[in-house]
Amino acid sequence: MEQIQIIDAKHHVGETVKIGAWVANKRSSGKIAFLQLRDGTAYFQGIVVKNEVGEDMFQLAKNLHQETSIWIVGEIREDSRSKFGYEIGISSIEVVGESHEYPITPKEHGTDFLMDHRHLWLRSSRQHAIMQIRNEIIRATYEFFNNNGFTKVDPPILTGSAPEGTTDLFETNYFDQKAYLSQSGQLYMEAAAMAFGKVFSFGPTFRAEKSKTRRHLIEFWMIEPEMAFMHQEQSLEVQEQYVAFLVQNVLDNCDYALDVLERDKELLKKYTQLPFPRITYDDAVELLKKNGFDDVEWGDDFGSPHETFIANSFEQPVFILNYPKAIKPFYMKPHPTREDVVICADMIAPEGYGEIIGGSERATDYEFVLEQIRKQGLDENEYSWYLDLRKYGSVPHSGFGLGLERTVTWLSGIEHVREAIPFPRLLNRIYP
Ligand code: 4AD
Ligand code: MG
């Protein structure tokens, strides 16, 4: 008898199979028990009929506790009434691991309680759906960059560099030196682009953000492409094609997960339309002022109400171009005709999900980069390797970073970024 995963049920209709599963819930009448089961791939129903399995097996089924693990044997059947579409008519059950007083019951629980039980909460159908979407975004990311001539390069996690400013660094001891956990792999990816042309990374990044918002994690995963011989305008095209590709693949491959999350698919379809709109930072400030945001002055960074208002003025993700130099990192290319802005763009997701991409063209001039490093109070000796990139065959190059969890949150249509990563690290939480 074949052991299968229920996700493959359509290839096994009418066959008797063996499945390892957990009991999510159950109900029974005098003669039939309905087990709500999950095997890690999907949630499905198992039906136990007293007349078919006998009194002992039926009693065993009726008395199974939530999250008991079991082997089941039975026949796969189509079931047009369920969302999943298949069920199993169970002929035998064998208990593998008992479970008593499972803390997460089908009733509502508070967020703190669920976060304390994250190791178990992950088993619920909603969390399962979100993780399926996360997995699809990761899969589609590799597909997109592999298909477009990029090489994956892994930057270090322990580093001496601080590309995104020194305020939120995690410092650690590196024998008799100090080191930081990576905020961004970008500087290394610039070196990699000079070696391999078009590169991308995918890895964890760390920021000791003191802000407690629904968009910030302390540890989050970033995808960072970097492209040699490429100006910002071409980079924006790569960015919009990449994001549209992610949305399309989530639509194509996560239909069931989107249903579980009750995500509006018609809305998602709009986000596959290219190009995405572009406005400058200057125009964004104007737009906000005209609409009653009296608190915004040219030169300020946008807060989340501002980003949400700008996003709501468009139907797709929107690029905000050319921010003030003073609020952006040292490596960005200066504007050719204006002193006060740099060649950069943030991509703002629709529906109030905020910035999902930060990117820019990179400064290529040795003297200019050195001056910026000094101005930011960084130790130029620690950046001499980075400056080398401007000494030996410096070329125009551009890149960007997409925040995985922000993207998962947006495409899943969920409230808070903490549910977009298996084990979130938050300001007050490093457990479980
Ligand atoms: O805009 P950021 O800071 O850009 C960089 O780090 C560049 N070095 C990337 C590059 O050009 N290679 O971060 C990039 C993205 C943001 O747009 C956001 O989606 C995400 O990373 N992000 C966070 N996500 C969750 N929690 C946080 N604390 C985040 N900080 C940034
Ligand atoms: Mg940013």
Image: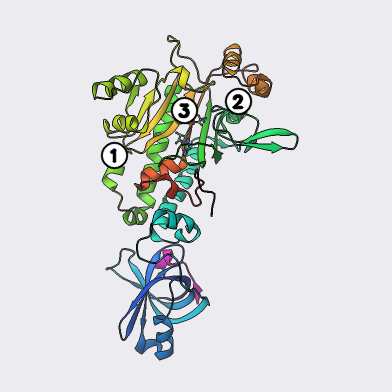
Query: Is residue 125 placed above or below 64 in the rendered structure?
Result: above
Q: Is mark 2 within 8 Å of ligand 1?
A: no
Which comes before the other along the chain, label 1 or label 3? Answer: 1
Q: Please name whichever residue, 364 or 324, is drawn nearer the observer in this view of the structure.
A: 324
Residue at the farthest left position: 291
- Left or right placement of residue 398 versus residue 381 in this view: left
Q: Is residue 384 visible?
A: yes
The residue that label 1 is drawn on is 270
The residue at the point 57 percent across, 19 percent down is 376
Which comes before the other along the chain, label 3 or label 2? Answer: 2
- Answer few, some or many: residues within 10 Å of disc 2's Cα (few below 14, many 20 plus, some between 14 and 19): many
Q: Are the residues at dot 1 and dot 2 in contact (C-beta closer than 8 Å)?
A: no
Which comes before the other along the chain, label 1 or label 2? Answer: 2
The residue that label 3 is drawn on is 359
Q: Please name whichever residue, 273 or 421, is drawn nearer the observer in this view of the structure.
A: 421
Q: How is the image coloured?
A: rainbow
The residue that label 2 is drawn on is 194
Residue 123 appears in which quarter of the rendering? Answer: bottom left
Kind of residue indicated by mark 2: Met
The residue at the point 75 percent across, 34 percent down is 176
Q: Position of residue 335 (x, y in %)?
A: 45, 14
- Answer few, some or many: residues within 10 Å of disc 3's Cα (few below 14, many 20 plus, some between 14 and 19): many
**Residues in magenta, as a range:** 1-10
Q: Is mark 3 within 8 Å of ligand 1?
A: yes
Query: Is residue 329 placed above or below 242 in the rendered structure?
Result: above
